[in-house]
Amino acid sequence: MAISISRRDARYAALSGLIDYAGLFPPAELGMAAAAAEYRAARSGPDSWIVDRFLCPVGRLVELAGILTSTMSPGEAPWRVSAIANTETGLEAEVAAVDSFDSEMTGGALVEQIEVRLPTGDSAAWAARALEMFDRFVFFEIPWRIDLDAALDGLVAAREGTRRALGAKIRTGGHTADEFPPPEVVAAFLLGCRDRSLPLKATAGLHHPIRHVDPATGFTQHGFLNLLCAAALAVHGEDPATLAAVVAEDDPEAFTFDRSGLRWRDHLATAADLQAARNGLFVGYGSCSFDEPVDDLTGLGVLPVGS
């Protein structure tokens, strides 16, 4: 693995394993063979330290297993998979599919995590049941329009009742403009997870580092660097209004990101802050492209050219 940035560098602390590859999902929606090839290229390329797991719907694990068994080379590192469960299928069927995949791959790939949408209602009991059935780490996606505190408290109750680790997930985009949560909601989600010691993941709409208007859709999309900076400042103890302003920032020049830390205007997240945020709060996000965020970071001067 070629790493052109020192492990003591703030950029390494912030970006290492940040991206889960989601090439199967919109807007890329690649076929399984193409998505597997892109992930394989990413995990073997010079920026492989930035990519983490392969995201795959539980219903397509059989298809993934077929691709892997026919294309994996001797000595290839095992694939780490995060599987997206479908509650409409029924948890029993989803659990069986995950267990079958792990068994068939015999160590060549492993579903390490489950991601599933948290239904409304008795979230604590449902989450506890899902944790016990899947018997692995689960990120529960919380619809951002519901009572956030109640949903997060439900996850805490499930964690305490089962004594199993879990996390929360926020969807930061979608197919229509109203599916993108306002900066204040994203900031509240960060703080809610911080205050409950819940790791979080984000997904959808985070195609570029800085918040911007997408020219193709006209939608204002969140930036993953905004979220990363806000998470680090949340760990550092910044107030809700400041965090919302960081999430809402659309001027790339307001950010400075180098070996010493990630700065937003006059607020600095040090390497220690960034490491703490990645370890315990903002653990990563899903992106249907790997090249796009890496190219953008290179264009901003965060990553060296030809890294």
Image (tube, rainbow, N blue to C red):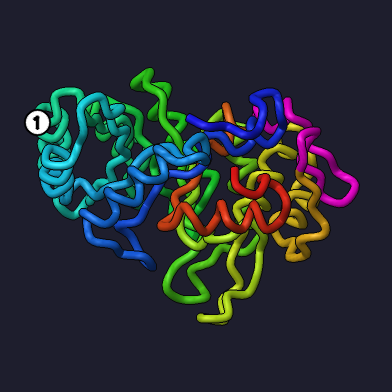
Corner quadrant of residue 102: top left
Question: What residue sits 38% from the left and 29% below the top?
Answer: 158
Q: Specify the quadrant that holds the C terminus.
A: top right
- Image coords of residue 164 (percent x, y): 37, 21
Tag 1 secondary structure = helix
From the viewer's side, name the closer residue of 117 and 33. 33
User: Is the residue 174 above or below the residue 261 in the image?
Assistant: below
Location of residue 256 in the rendering, given as x and y in whole percent from the top left corner: 80, 48
- The image shows residue 44 at horizontal and vertical percentages of 40, 38
Task: State the residue in front, 132 or 180.
Answer: 180
Residue 275 lies in magenta, yes or no? yes
Residues drawn in magenta: 258-277
Looking at the picture, does residue 283 appear above or below residue 145?
Answer: above
**Number of numbered discs visible in the structure rendering:** 1
Q: Is residue 60 left or right of residue 291?
A: left
Residue at which label 1 appears: 104
- Residue 154 visible to the viewer: no
| Residue lying farthest to the top in this orientation | 163
Image side of residue 304 versus residue 75, left or right: right
Magenta highlight on residue 181 = no
Q: Can residue 19 be seen in the rendering of this structure?
A: yes
Q: Residue at x 80, y 33 (%)?
A: 260
Q: Residue at x 21, y 54 (%)?
A: 33
The residue shown at (46%, 76%) is 176
